[in-house]
Amino acid sequence: MKYSVLIFIILFQISCAQESNSFKNEYPNRHIGDIEFDSKLDNPDFKLCYPENVFQYFNWGDGLEFEEEKIKIDNIFSEKYNPKSAKKESGSIRIRFIVNCKGETDRFRIIGSDENYQEKEFDKSITDQLLSIIKSLNGWKLKYFRENENQPIDYYQYLIFKIENGQIVKILP
């Protein structure tokens, strides 16, 4: 009886050790939500200055980091976006990306949700347009870890588009 309990304990410990190793391999990112390079989606020439320290947008609470502020972005999308009349195309589209220390952008990721916050894939003509316009934006501010430092950092930024029947009704933040 003692040997069976001992064998059970040893097997249990080996099993636990193997599970924890596989857990570490499944989640290689530094933080939840980090955007890793994807050769199918991302520009290989886009370089981060500090790949281990890309700051999240919530680290400061400053909101949108664009030279001419949100009104400029609203105007650009109003001019360039060609609305698609589509009854089933309503909800929110979030496009998240990285601004590097030079003010360049890449690693764009899109997540869509319907009015009930359930994941939704929007018509490609809508998401492709939004992505193309965002990629054309110039004027992302350089961000610094501390105000008195002269070395800009890499950071995440996002735009959320509230869509109703294929029309942009609001852009956040």
Image (cartoon, helix red, strand yellow):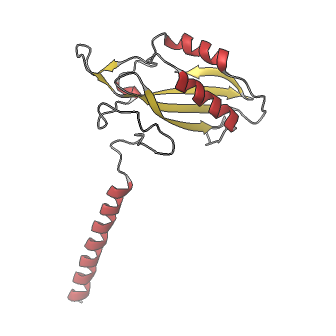
- In the picture, the quarter occupied by the N terminus is bottom left
Residue most toward the front?
45
**What residue appears at the point 31 percent right and 72 percent down from the top-left corner?**
15
Residue 172 in which image quadrant: top right
Residue 6: give x, y in percent of width and height: 22, 82
Picture residue at 26% right of the left edge, 14% below the top: 147
Foreground pick, 13 / 71: 71
Q: Where does the image place residue 63, in percent across and percent down from the top left?
A: 44, 19
Instruction: Give coordinates of residue 26: x percent, y percent.
Output: 38, 56
Which is more toward the observer, 106 or 71?
Answer: 106
Looking at the image, residue 142 sits to the left or right of residue 145; the answer is right
Name the residue: 25% across, 77% down.
9
Image position of 110 (left or right of 162): left
Residue placed farthest to the bottom in the image?
1
Q: In the figure, is residue 17 to the left or right of 98?
A: left
Question: What residue appears at the point 72 percent right and 34 percent down from the top-left corner?
Answer: 89
| 21 versus 146 height, above or below | below
Image coords of residue 16 (percent x, y): 30, 68
Number of on-image labels: 0
